[in-house]
Amino acid sequence: MKDLEPRRRADVTVKVVSLGEKRSVIGKDGSSHQVMDVLVGDETGSVLMSVWDSNIQKVSQGKVFAIEDGFVSVHRGSMRLSLGRTGKMIETQGTFEVNTQNNISNKVVEEEPRRRYGRY
């Protein structure tokens, strides 16, 4: 977690610490999706990860995943790990304790202003 930076790609191996509540959301295109916030981490810290749709059934407490081509987004001022458009979540092996004392999702990150296109 020590190498994660806001709005950057991420390749990390994480262990699932705890699962949040699954909820339904409507996408920008009007389609329905399921999403769950999952606390994951490694020896250096922890972060909330948004897990979507079919990946929800893959996660359970204690499982270890290699996140390839993930993305660190900023949601309401806090960092979140997600798979983004091209990311992969691959179950793997690992024996490490997660440092939950250093939860980087609890640290406030300044939002970047949204870009506006067109004439001013």
Image (cartoon, helix red, strand yellow):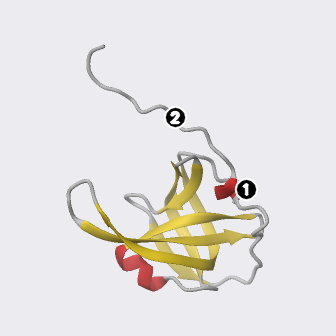
Residue 59 or residue 11, whichever sits in front:
59
Residue 63, above or below 5: below
Q: Which mark is residue 26?
A: none
Residue occupied by mark 2: 112
Q: Position of residue 54 (x, y in %)?
A: 36, 79
The count of marks equals: 2
Residue occupied by mark 1: 2
For residue 71, side relative to residue 24 (left or right): right
Question: Where is the C terminus found, in terms of image quarters?
Answer: top left
For residue 59, side relative to residue 104 (left or right): left
Labels 1 and 2 touching (C-beta < 8 A): no
SS label for mark 1: loop
Residue type, numbered disc 1: Lys
Residue type, numbered disc 2: Glu
Residue 20, above or below 79: below
Q: Residue at x 37, y 58 (%)?
A: 85
Q: Nearer the viewer, mark 1 or mark 2?
A: 2
Residue 13 or residue 98, whichever sits in front:
98
Q: Quadrant of residue 61?
A: bottom right
Q: Position of residue 16 (x, y in %)?
A: 61, 78
Q: Position of residue 96 (x, y in %)?
A: 76, 79
Q: Residue at x 22, y 64 (%)?
A: 31
SS label for mark 2: loop
Label 1, label 2: how far apart the Cα atoms are = 21 Å
> Residue most toward the top?
120
Q: Residue at x 55, y 57 (%)?
A: 80
